[in-house]
Image: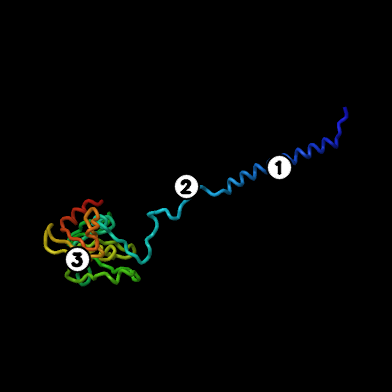
Amino acid sequence: MAVDLRRTRSLMAAAAVLAAAALSACGGADADQAAAPVPSSAAPSSAAPTSAVPPIKGKLRGYGTVRQLSEAADLVVRGEVEAAGFRVDEVLRATTGSTVRAGARITLASLPSGVPDSAHMSTLEAGQVVVLYLAKDPTAPTFRTLSGDFGVFDVSGTGAEAIAVTRSQAMAVSGLLTEDPAASGHGFRTTLGQLRTVAAQVR
């Protein structure tokens, strides 16, 4: 039986075209899947909260409790403001590596320029006895009170029962370990002994 070569070539060409079309269709489907958007549950969300987000420049962090202040501070000290700095009479808490001891004198720096809240802060004056919650300047041998007045307690009396009162009513904690919404905006009053106890609990 004779084979029609022309017919065979035509069939082979048609088969090749069909195979190419099938491969193209498969490739197209894969490409569509690769280009499809990732489901929202797997995609990172710019709205998701993250602790790595820096605070807004020019704003001061608020603190709700003495414990929060103690945890955030590089140094918690009781002492007296002097004309040329601060005399440390007692270290309530210091981070690892701190060389500040009772009897030392440290330099206090003001809030960074341009912070709007700085206009509402009090000033530390010679002769005032206070407990300060301080942040160390990483580039200079100075300290700054945490969020201005938040980090200042005025002390009156002696011993563990000495009264410690927040410098500001508005910029003040409202409790030792837990916040008290009813006390918010009215300042906070405690004892030196209580400040010592909370500072000692933070490691």
Tell me if label 1 and label 3 are in contact, CB under 8 Å.
no
Tell me the mark number nearer the camera, choosing from 2 and 3: 2
Of labels 1 and 3, earlier in sequence is 1
Residue 124's spot in the image, x, y percent? 22, 70
Query: What is the quadrant of residue 122 in the picture?
Result: bottom left
Residue that badge 2 annotates:
41
Q: Is residue 103 in view?
A: no
189 in relation to 117, above or below: above
Secondary structure found at label 1: helix
Q: Amino acid at mark 1?
A: Ala
Residue that badge 1 annotates:
21
Tell me if label 1 and label 2 are in contact, CB under 8 Å.
no
Q: Amino acid at mark 2?
A: Ser
Q: Is residue 201 in view?
A: yes
Query: What is the quadrant of residue 85 in the picture?
Result: bottom left
Query: What is the quadrant of residue 96 in the picture?
Result: bottom left
Taking the spot 34% from the left edge, 65% from the top edge, the residue there is: 59
